[in-house]
Image: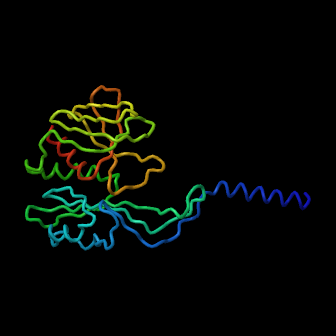
Amino acid sequence: MNRVSVVAMLVAIGLLTSSLVSCTPPFPVHKRTVALGGTVRNLADPKTVKPGISRRDEVLIAFKDVDTRALSRWFFWGRWSSSSWAMWVFADSPGPERLWSLTNFLVEFDEAGTVTKTTTVSDDRIISELLRIPAERPESPEMIPAAPVVLAGHVSPSKKGHWCQSNIVISRSTIEFSMNEHCRPSHLSLPLQGLTVGNYAKRRGEGPDPALLRFTLRSAAELGISGFGVSLKPNDLVMLLRLLQASR
């Protein structure tokens, strides 16, 4: 093989390699934390909350910047995303892309407002935790919102993964989704009885969002829909779970 052929081969290998490798290895960057209200400047350490010692009012003050505003006598729910690493993506990014990690911080209280348990979980476990707590410690009747309740969210009713804005109306017996005309179906009504809430499997490109939580709704009704994605604010999700529990 002559020198020209060797050079041509090396150039071809280089071009092929650069096309296959579309990003750099992660590198450290200045840490940034965001929550429902925006950037968090000073996030308290969850390890400072001690079961049997810390009090509810102390937790609410220390973690007010990451509070999801899910009002409950029995628990506090903090939620935030943090990033300490980034990478360069060569395809279409004007700058380095941050790598984000989402945290849900649950703190449980007893009747006197003393911390009994702390849990740090991902979105894969938060639904089961939010279902467990009211099953063990039911909320007082005044914490159950009076129906109908009107919420604003997003729905992914098809397997194509498109998200549509939706008005969500929850009555004592049904939950109704009214989407824009570009969505199919544009209207969906499901009975609350037999409705279950589960984890949502993120699709490629869907990053963590502390202001919204995606989950899956499944109905026992024969409607030709086995399950679909719903996105709500964290406190609205808690409200939905309470209404589902009250309907049973």
Identified at 31% across, 74% down, the residue is: 42
- Number of numbered discs visible in the structure rendering: 0
Residue 228 to residue 221: above or below: below
Q: Quadrant of the N terminus?
A: bottom right
Residue 72 quadrant: bottom left
- On the image, the x and y values in percent for residue 101 come to 40, 61
Identified at 43% across, 54% down, the residue is: 207
Q: Is residue 71 left or right of residue 65?
A: left
Q: Is residue 33 left or right of residue 64?
A: right
- On the image, the x and y values in percent for residue 229 come to 35, 41
Residue 225 quadrant: top left
- On the image, the x and y values in percent for residue 106 come to 24, 60
Identified at 35% across, 66% down, the residue is: 39
Q: Quadrant of the C terminus?
A: top left
Residue 200 to residue 11: above or below: above
Residue 126 to residue 196: above or below: below
Query: Outermost residue toward the right?
Result: 2
Q: How did the renderer colour the structure?
A: rainbow
Q: Is residue 61 left or right of residue 12?
A: left
Identified at 25% across, 74% down, the residue is: 48
- On the image, the x and y values in percent for residue 22 come to 61, 57
